[in-house]
Image: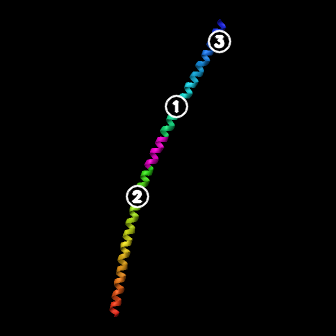
């Protein structure tokens, strides 16, 4: 009976070691999963913030470009009107 008890004790000890190893592995996987989720969420937040900032910069650049285009168009129209008016004056003087 003593040998059986010793064998049972050895089996219990082996099960306890296996249980501790498994618990450590599960704990490590949980820590890894938590760190991965936190990192993923941080990266998603940073990407969202970057996209919003880039969108804002794009919108500002577009507005500035459109304002410049309108200004150039207005100045060009005035120049053409002046040219046509000068040409009309020359034509009217020659008649």
Q: Quadrant of the C terminus?
A: bottom left
Which residue is painted at 62% across and 18% down in the image? 14
Disc 1 on helix, strand or loop?
A: helix
The residue most toward the right is 3
Q: What is the quadrant of residue 57 in the picture? A: bottom left
Disc 2 on helix, strand or loop?
A: helix
Vertical position of residue 93 compared to residue 4: above or below: below
Vertical position of residue 24 compared to residue 92: above or below: above
In terms of sequence position, does the residue under pointer 2 or pointer 1 come before the other?
1
Number of callouts in the render?
A: 3
Cα separation between marks 2 and 1? 43 Å
12 left or right, relative to 93: right
Q: How is the image coloured?
A: rainbow
Q: What is the quadrant of residue 62 in the picture? A: bottom left
Q: Which region of the structure is painted magenta?
A: 40-49
Mark 2 Cα shell of 10 Å, populated few (<14), some (14-19), many (≥20):
few
Which residue is painted at 39% across and 63% down in the image? 64
Cα separation between marks 3 and 2? 77 Å
Vertical position of residue 29 compared to residue 62: above or below: above
The residue under label 3 is: 7
The residue under label 1 is: 30
Q: Quadrant of the N terminus?
A: top right
Disc 3 on helix, strand or loop?
A: helix
The residue under label 2 is: 59
Position in image of residue 38 (x %, y %): 48, 38
In terms of sequence position, does the residue under pointer 1 or pointer 3 come before the other?
3
């Amino acid at each position: 009976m003593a040998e059986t008890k010793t064998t049972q004790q050895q089996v219990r000890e082996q099960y306890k070691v296996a249980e501790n190893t498994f618990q450590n592995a599960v704990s490590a996987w949980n820590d890894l999963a938590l760190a991965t989720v936190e990192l993923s969420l941080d990266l998603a937040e940073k990407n969202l913030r970057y996209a919003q900032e880039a969108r804002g910069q794009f919108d500002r650049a577009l507005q500035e470009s459109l304002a410049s285009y309108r200004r150039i168009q207005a100045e060009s129209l005035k120049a053409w009107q002046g040219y046509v008016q000068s040409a009309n004056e020359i034509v009217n003087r020659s008649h």
